[in-house]
Image (spheres, rainbow, N blue to C red):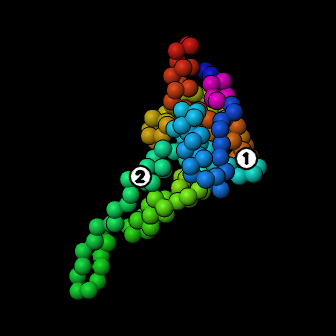
Amino acid sequence: MDKTILDVMTSTPITVKPETDLKDAIALLTKHQISGLPVVDQKENLLGILSESDLMWQESGVEPPPYIMILDSIIYLQNPGRYEKEIHKALGQTVGDVMSEKPITIKGGQKIKEAAQILHHKDVRRLPVIDDHGKVIGIITQGDIIRAMALE
């Protein structure tokens, strides 16, 4: 496959802003039958990504980290900072509250094979496609790659 990301990506991805209400973002996901949305600022620069996994905190809740007590001291067996982040996501009301920051991205000129490797090895379902200035110009998913393979 010598095609590039530009050849197979969705070039007009649906995006949301960090201040978008979660209910509105969920409605977009449902309406368009997609599993994630790039989160952009006013200039379309990528800030993060909102995925179904990010939204699961809303329904699944958060379990406190395991700990033991020794002589009136609490010793956490997991990082308590992670627990605070999970609570923030579970209680979030806007996209910015629950989105994943610093998503893995790809450039449009890269080969489809590179996208496939990232999607497979990093266990992600979508890659925002950005230009040299960090602006979102598209999105590529596992489905896009499979469709490209079918056309070969």
User: What is the x, y in percent for residue 4?
Assistant: 64, 26
Amino acid type assigned to the residue bearing label 1 in the image: Glu
Disc 1 from disc 2: Cα separation: 30 Å
Q: Could you tell which of marks 1 and 2 lies nearer the N-terminus?
A: 1
User: What is the x, y in percent for residue 89?
Assistant: 49, 59
Q: What element carries label 2?
A: helix
Which one is nearer the viewer's eye here, 124 or 109?
A: 124
* Residue 125 visible in the current orientation: yes
Going 64% across and 52% down the picture, which residue do you hit?
20
User: What is the x, y in percent for residue 19?
Assistant: 65, 56
Going 65% across and 36% down the picture, which residue do you hit?
13
In the picture, the quarter occupied by the N terminus is top right
Q: On the image, numbered disc 1 is attached to which residue?
A: 44
User: What numbered label is drawn on residue 63?
Assistant: none
Q: What element carries label 1?
A: loop
* Residue 105 visible in the current orientation: no
Cβ atoms at labels 1 and 2 below 8 Å apart: no
Q: Label 1: few (<14), some or many (≥20) within 10 Å?
A: some
Which one is nearer the viewer's eye here, 26 or 135?
A: 26
Q: On the image, numbered disc 2 is attached to which residue?
A: 59
Amino acid type assigned to the residue bearing label 2 in the image: Glu
Q: Tell me if residue 15 comes above or below residue 114 in the rendering.
A: below
Q: What stretch is highlighted in magenta?
A: 4-10
Q: In this view, does 134 lie to the left or right of 81?
A: right
Going 59% across and 56% down the picture, which residue do you hit?
94
